[in-house]
Image (cartoon, helix red, strand yellow):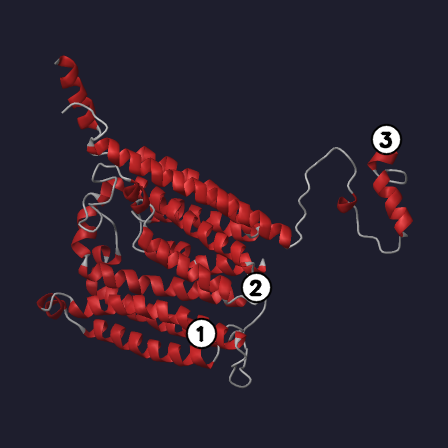
Amino acid sequence: MPISNEHEVLKRRFRRNLALGGVLLLFVVLVFFMTMAKIRQGSLMEAFDHTYRASLGPLDGSRSSTENDSRMKGEGEGPAAETGR
Amino acid sequence: MNGMTDSKTTIDRFEDEASFGEYVSLLKPRVMSLVIFTAAVGLLVAPVPLDPVLAFASILFIALGAGASGALNMWWDADIDCHMRRTARRPIPSGRIAPETARDLGIALSLISVGMLALAANHLAAGLLAFTIFFYVVVYTIWLKRWTPQNIVIGGASGALPPMIGWAAATGQISVESVLMFLLIFMWTPPHFWALSLFMNDDYSRAGVPMLTVTHGRRTTRRHIFAYTLVLVLVSLALAFTSIGGPVYLAAAVALDVLFVAGAWKLLGRSEAAAEADGYAAEKRFFRLSLLYLFLHFVALLVEKGLKLAGLEIGEWPVLLSGAF
């Protein structure tokens, strides 16, 4: 039998590809909803951005907010201040 | 004309190409359903609630990890699966999926499931899932299954881990409660599979799998089933006196334990002639009872959780076993 679009093998392959496409789509949707859930929980969504991040430093209640602010800006201690940048 | 002949040859080569459903069957959906149920119970009875989306994703990826190890198991066991009636129609022995395809799919799904569980839940749960896959594929399938009659005793650990993973996904810890849920399935596995091997012994003999019935005979297997059932009863009752137990669970456990011990006692007293005469009816009944036994234990744990959430706790329940490791 010559190959045609009506052949059972091609139909089966189409159904398989369709199902796989559906699974991949559901995976993308699931990752989206997982991300939303993580953000709702207040998870940090930070990536390395080549600057000093206050969230990586110790939580120090004894410091004044001004000191903590200056640390964030790299004016006090911390890697940025130490390297003179 | 020649082109048409070539076309026919080419198309014929793909006649046996697997459908999507056959790829799904590679993941052992029936085993996955047990994993989904026990992992879900482990997650739901935990004292820390998990976001519904993350809980759903966690159970899904635990199930996917179990499916991945099922595919790897089928890849490794393809040579013996074709000798057993129960497994001869699986996609690899029947020639619809190549062993290498199953192996690659298993490895890919293992990596995806562990990585995604780490993102959905935490690293402890992901680590336990990775250990489960490793234990099932390497320790059980590759090492123990064809080497020792204790194969399902030790290998049963991988099937017992899902509720512990579910609990870890919610709490980030391993606790007495999750260890006892693990032990419940761990001690249940030998009587369950040995009951199966009592009436499927010919299959295992043909495939050369050293099940206890093959290496030590049915009489020894019956004694082992009874001994493991007694230990199982202790674990089942101990779980009642943890933070996830309660009077409803205890009542269910006692009733199921009485039935299970009675079933194991009956198997112990049966002669091989009597068993053969009725086509292993009592052994088949005990096997079906074992499925119900485990299912109802976990349902009872869910009922306890439901009662606590609804504020319908019956008095002060003594919690004798508790705490995280």
Residue B98 seen in the current view:
no
- The answer to whether marks 3 and 1 sit on the same chain is no
Check the residue under mark 1 and report the chain it is in. Answer: B
Disc 1 residue type (three-letter): Val
Q: Secondary structure at mark 1?
A: helix
Q: Do residues under tags 2 and 3 come within 8 Å of each other at their CB atoms? A: no
In the rendered image, the quadrant that contains the C terminus of chain B is bottom right
Disc 2 residue type (three-letter): Pro
Crowding around mark 3 (Cα neighbors within 10 Å: few <14, some 14 to 19, many 20+) is: few
Disc 3 residue type (three-letter): Thr
Q: Position of residue A3 (x, y in %)?
A: 20, 24
Residue drawn at the location 48% of the way across and 78% of the way down: B246
Residue drawn at the location 18% of the way across and 20% of the way down: B7
- The answer to whether marks 2 and 3 sit on the same chain is no
Instruction: State the residue position of label 1.
Output: B303
Instruction: State the residue position of label 2.
Output: B49
Whole-number angstrom distance, CA of label 2 to CA of label 3: 45 Å
Q: Position of residue A52 (x, y in %)?
A: 79, 38
Q: Earlier in the sequence, mark 2 or mark 1?
A: 2
Instruction: State the residue position of label 3.
Output: A83
Residue drawn at the location 56% of the way across and 71% of the way down: B322
Check the residue under mark 3 and report the chain it is in. Answer: A
Q: Secondary structure at mark 2?
A: loop
Q: How many numbered marks are there?
A: 3
